[in-house]
């Protein structure tokens, strides 16, 4: 393992015992008689294969994810959603009551939630609001990552909830500055929607960088819970696979759903949907831009918009009364008066547009 990563692991992790699960001992696709896991030999009707434990890291899924993200299979860990990846990172790197994570607020809430449970400190470096978009406070982020016992620095790009993509050059500069200090985790949950794309082609140049991906968003697979961690260090990935996750992180139906999504035909449909969502985002944005109740629409490189709306909380309630659920961020630091609006179907967005058009600004 690269020293820039090895020094970040909690001291006990290397010696912590490893659970060798039944499914690891032999490939479940082999034609063997399995009497090693106290499984039930009888499948029930319509539930084929569910009587057997799934493989913790199915090689065929790792190969498919590796191809999708343009990395080698040994550089991919599959997990139960991006959420489980964040949990594993926190658990293996952050010493309770001692270490810290660094994040730029506002950002995805799960980094701080998992840190809070360790507990690890959360060092917050607020984004700079330019009025139309948000930028990273690069110097402050580097200083925090270098000096406050930080183990993980998260950059979410495109960022939830602002929709902002941060320049790849800048993220890579931050990664270089943090080498020997912290792991830079680039959360690319929304990368497929982004004009900028992924940093995965540059992973090999940054030993202290890891990338979080998910099939939840662009590939319509939220309910199956399939995410991935990418890192150019195969030993780091192997350690996370062995000690960072539950013994059986991915239920078999989720593995099968992921394999179906990653087939060429279904991927084609997924990419058509991505294009439809982006076109609808731009249409919706143009349609609401000049409405009296709309104060600011922040630049978005993702499948949602952060919009400052007059009497935002009341508008949220008004929409809820019409069975439309937006995300109310109006009370969050740095996000006063804003709602986050996911881009749905054109018919769904037309309803929000209509409600916004009729919304009195005062
Ligand atoms: C930025 C970001 N990262 C990660 C996740 C987690 O995604 P999942 O656990 O569904 O893979 C989300 C979910 O909303 C997100 O917005």
Image (spheres, grey):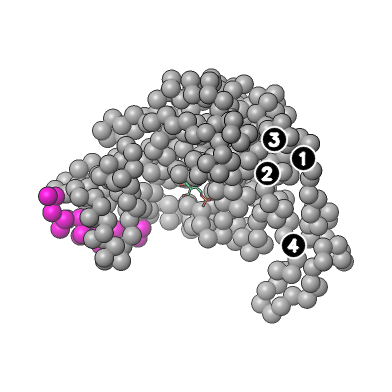
Q: Secondary structure at mark 4?
A: loop
Label 2 belongs to which residue? 244
Query: Is label 2's Cβ within 8 Å of ligand 1?
Result: no
Between the C-alphas of marks 4 and 2, the distance is: 19 Å
Q: Position of residue 61 (x, y in %)?
A: 67, 52
Between the C-alphas of marks 2 and 3, the distance is: 10 Å
Q: Residue at x 40, y 25 (%)?
A: 137
Tell me which numbered mark, 1 or 3, is placed earlier along the sequence.
1
Q: Say few, some or many: other residues with alpha carbon within 10 Å of mark 3 (under 14 / 14 to 19 / 20 or more).
A: many
* Quadrant of the rendered image containing residue 30: bottom right
* Quadrant of the rendered image containing residue 230: top right
Between the C-alphas of marks 4 and 1, the distance is: 23 Å
Q: Say few, some or many: other residues with alpha carbon within 10 Å of mark 4 (under 14 / 14 to 19 / 20 or more).
A: many
User: What residue span does the magenta drawing correspond to?
Assistant: 344-362
Tell me which numbered mark, 4 or 1, is placed earlier along the sequence.
1
Do the CB atoms of the residues marked 1 and 2 lie less than 8 Å apart? no
Label annotation for residue 236:
3
* Mark 4 or 1: the one toward you: 1
Label 4 belongs to which residue? 53
Residue 246, placed above or below residue 171: below
Do the CB atoms of the residues marked 4 and 1 lie less than 8 Å apart? no
* Mark 4 or 2: the one toward you: 2
Please say whether residue 109 is one of the residues in the magenta stretch. Answer: no
């Amino acid at each position: 393992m690269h020293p820039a990563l090895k020094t970040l692991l909690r001291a006990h992790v290397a010696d912590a015992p490893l659970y060798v699960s039944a499914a690891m001992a032999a490939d479940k696709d082999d034609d063997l008689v399995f009497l090693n896991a106290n499984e039930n030999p009888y499948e029930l009707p319509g539930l084929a294969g569910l009587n057997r434990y799934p493989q913790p890291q199915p090689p065929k899924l790792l190969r498919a994810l590796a191809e999708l993200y343009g990395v080698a299979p040994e550089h991919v860990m599959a997990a139960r959603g991006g959420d489980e990846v964040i949990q594993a990172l926190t658990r293996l790197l952050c010493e309770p009551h001692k270490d810290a994570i660094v994040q730029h607020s506002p950002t995805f809430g799960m980094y701080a939630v998992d840190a809070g449970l360790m507990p690890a400190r959360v060092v917050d470096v607020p984004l700079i609001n330019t009025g139309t978009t948000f930028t990273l406070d690069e110097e402050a982020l580097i200083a925090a990552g270098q000096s406050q016992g930080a183990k993980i620095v998260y950059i979410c790009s495109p960022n939830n909830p602002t929709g902002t993509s941060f320049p790849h050059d800048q993220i890579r500069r931050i990664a270089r500055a943090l080498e020997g200090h912290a792991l830079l985790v680039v959360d690319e949950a929304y990368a497929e929607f982004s004009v900028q794309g992924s940093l995965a082609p540059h992973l090999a140049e940054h030993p202290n960088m890891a990338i979080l991906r998910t099939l939840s968003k662009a590939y319509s697979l939220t309910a199956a819970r399939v995410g991935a961690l990418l890192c150019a260090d195969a030993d780091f990935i192997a350690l996370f696979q062995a000690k960072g996750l539950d013994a059986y992180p991915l239920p078999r139906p989720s593995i099968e759903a992921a394999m179906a999504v990653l087939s060429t035909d279904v991927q084609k449909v997924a990419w058509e949907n991505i294009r439809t969502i982006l076109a609808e985002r731009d249409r919706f944005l143009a349609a609401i831009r000049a409405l009296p109740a709309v104060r600011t629409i922040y630049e978005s490189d993702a499948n949602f918009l952060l919009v400052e709306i007059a009497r935002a909380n009341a508008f949220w309630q008004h929409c809820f009364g019409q069975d439309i659920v937006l995300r109310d961020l109006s009370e969050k630091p740095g996000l006063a008066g804003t709602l986050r609006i996911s881009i749905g179907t054109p018919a769904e967005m037309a309803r929000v547009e209509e409600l916004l058009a009729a919304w009195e600004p005062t």
